[in-house]
Amino acid sequence: PARSRAVARRATIRPGAPARRGDGFPGMSESHAGGGDRGENKNARRGLLRGAAGAVRFFLRRVAPARSGAALSGETRAPTPAPVSRREFFRGGFARLRVRVAEAAAGAIESRVAPARWMRPPGAGTELEFLTACERCHECAPACEYGAIRYLGPEAGLGVGTPALFVNEVACRLCRDLPCQRACPSGALRPLQWHAVRMGHARISEMYCWAYQGKACTACARACPLPENPVVFTQGVPVIRAEGCTGCGLCFFACPATPNAITVRAGPP
């Protein structure tokens, strides 16, 4: 019976009529006629699903482990700096160069106008600062009971009338109360602890030092009054740490060598 119905259906097709999708296939109804369109939609959906699945796999394999590792290690990525234009780059470079040149020029001018030729009493700043602050009142020298402070004459130029020390003639005793500082009314000699005084620095000549000639001598180390003695002995010979030296000159007078193996200079090393 089913075969006879199929034969009868094919017999009803008119000659010359346009063939419809599904014609000539037994048992195919109108609802099955659009099966090709639905197949194309299924293929499209399958392609989308495959693409989404690939994106998920990429995230799980690459992105997620990197983020979790950074979170566990506590690392944070620095923000990307904003791009700098060529004009801004050169403008900033020239600005920094101007600052460096100005600083160097100021230091050169100060060293020429007010070189550190003289050793100043305890508490003095740089030579230019001291010359600006000192009022030439002549109150500090009488306050020194050892007569270590003297006033400069016309040979000092801008420093005429200002106080100075000549520790190769009279050493500074580094008085604990520093009466010269207390006598200064202008603040040119700033108050500070006696062991923090930095007036100059001493050096040892290896040519004249007895210890360097093989003789046992510790006179310079014993003469230093500082609690942290800058004179240290290495393999039996003394070395003065210039950054810890006050420049008082006591070691100069304690040195038994002739000529004296110690020289004391004004200013920082």
Image: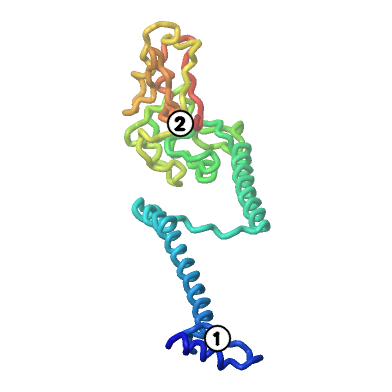
Neighbour tally class for label 2: few under 14, some 14-19, many 20 plus, Cα within 10 Å? many
Q: Amino acid at mark 2?
A: Ile
Residue closest to the eye, 42 or 168: 42
User: Mark 1 or mark 2: which comes first in sequence?
Assistant: 1
Q: Amino acid at mark 1?
A: Asp
Residue closest to the eye, 184 or 225: 225
Position of the N terminus, as image quadrant, is: bottom left
Neighbour tally class for label 1: few under 14, some 14-19, many 20 plus, Cα within 10 Å? some
Q: Is residue 60 above or below residue 254?
A: below
Left or right: where 250 falls relative to 10: left
In the rendered image, residue 111, in percent from the top left (x then y), is placed at 60, 37
Which residue is located at x 59 percent, y 59 percent? 83
Q: Which residue is mark 2?
A: 149
Q: Which residue is mark 1?
A: 23
Q: Secondary structure at mark 1?
A: loop
Residue 220 visible somewhere in the drawing = yes
Which residue is located at x 43 percent, y 86 percent? 2
Left or right: where 175 falls relative to 16: left
In the rendered image, residue 258, in percent from the top left (x then y), is placed at 47, 9
Which residue is located at x 54 percent, y 84 percent? 24
> Which of the 4 image quarters holds residue 193?
top left
